Amino acid sequence: MPQPRNYLAFDLGAESGRAMHAALHDDRMEIQEIHRFINLPVRLPDGFHWDILHMWSEIKNGMAKAAGSGFTFSSVGLDTWGVDFGLLDRNNALLGNPFYYRDARTDGMVEEAFKRMPRKDIFLKTGAQFSSFNTLYQLLSMSINQSPLFEIAETFLTMPDMFNFWMSGVVGNEFTDATTTQCLNPLTHTWDQDVLDAMNIPSRLFQKIIEPGTVLGPLRGEVANDTRLLGVTVIAPACHDTGSAVVAVPMQNPDCAWLSSGTWSIIGAEISAPDLSEKALAYNFANEGSVFGKWRLLKNVVGMWIVQECRRYWKKHGEDYSYQELTQMASEAQPFMAVINPDFEQFLFPGEMPGKIQKYCKSSGQQVPQTKGEILRVVFESLALKYRFVFTRLEELVRKQLNPIHIIGGGSQNRLLNQFTADCTGRLVVSGPVEATAIGNVLMQAIAMGHLGSIAEARDLVRKSFVVESFNPGKRDEWDRSYQKLLNFLKNESEI
């Protein structure tokens, strides 16, 4: 029996990072976690930052564990979130810790950007969803505040670009992550000079675009020596985590939707070309790069972040619950008490989330949830309702019915929310694989190394290797009534 090929995938999220070992056999893939570390922002006098040196140290720890496992690895690849970045000087030294995307320095920057270029023009030139934390507004804040870093910086690297550089020595901006910055033109695949000039952002900082699935080269000698991970090739997979996750969607029908469920819920479909229509602009959808010439037409919804913040609040007050326990509480609580908009501005920021939810319900004239189970039930039902809102608009944009909805990522383990989503949307929901992001990362490595022949072959391998679960829709009467409440709140939210 031939020996499996082994790959090392790093998947960095907003709460933790993992090193995953994948073994590729002729007819299946096996994947397991070999290292996990906490990844949280740090507050300094000038704001929230990522502790990037801690992250790099833990990445090297993961490499060392892989090297000590007795397996021979073919390649290593890394994916993480979009929008955040670091700047290098002329000697390729990092200038400061990268900011955390929820830092307040971007407050008001979207409105400032519109004074320099109309909203429609920015969308036509970038195809990106308007979010206050986008790279464009982080850089605009630096420009307005005359950051001295602009005077000495030579190189702009997104977070995965930074780690790719430290691993391989190759400087460049990977395509899928670059499309989240709101600085890249989706039609030309180049940095948009007009947008950068309008915001007074120096275009010299931006680097050549690296396509997903690019072989960057061998692991740098000093990194290989430090970790004893020898003979390994560094691959740029789809370096944006959702880009990697979508690679692993076990779709058989291209006319399907997917929902990447984690801290954020990202709802979208795979399309052949960017949608820069008036309707896509009005609905604030994003065109983000995918692999092999495809695009991800999507919209971000605040996801398990609200549950995570509730859990943190209760833990801070001496009550520590697992996510399974929280979901069980919600399943036993009274249904359809109240509805919230998960994307309400006050929910985007940390702190006292249960109280914020109760205040929203009271201000909107609804029954106020009192118990933890009632609060969580409101959150899960409201997430399903917001999914329906976005999903309806997604079908409008692609002009066809999308079925099934594939839910992937860590949130796909929440069977209660999966069933709510099926019931609320009236669509079949297929959940899994849980480790979609790491799996997609590995699949792109395998394709780059010539061990898999195509994306179709890769997705067929996912279907053979990982168990998925189906959720059929049930009665929708109560969901329809609650959906109308959500629509009314979205129209009048300024009054809440």
Image (tube, helix red, strand yellow):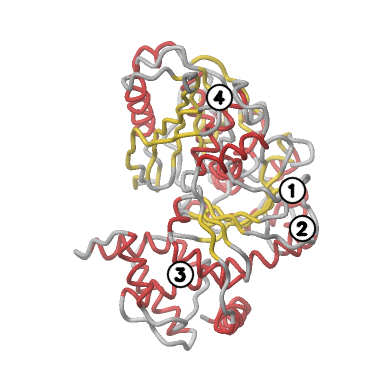
In the drawing, does residue 317 fall left or right of residue 58?
Answer: left
Of residues 427 and 176, the one nearer the viewer is: 427
Residue 354, position in %: x, y? 35, 71
- Which residue is painted at 49% across and 75% down in the image? 340
| Above or below, comparing residue 121 to residue 240 in the picture | below
Marked residue nearer the N-terminal end (2 or 4): 4
Tag 1's secondary structure?
A: strand
Question: Which disc is residue 380 wearing?
Answer: 3
Question: Which disc is residue 398 wearing?
Answer: 2
Marked residue nearer the N-terminal end (4 or 3): 4
Callouts 4 and 3 close, C-beta under 8 Å: no
In the drawing, does residue 149 fall left or right of residue 272?
Answer: left
Of residues 36 and 400, the one nearer the viewer is: 400
Query: Mark 1 — residue?
Result: 271
Determine crowd level at label 1: few under 14, some 14-19, many 20+ residues with C-alpha closer than 10 A.
some
Tag 3's secondary structure?
A: helix
Q: In which quarter of the image is residue 224?
A: top left
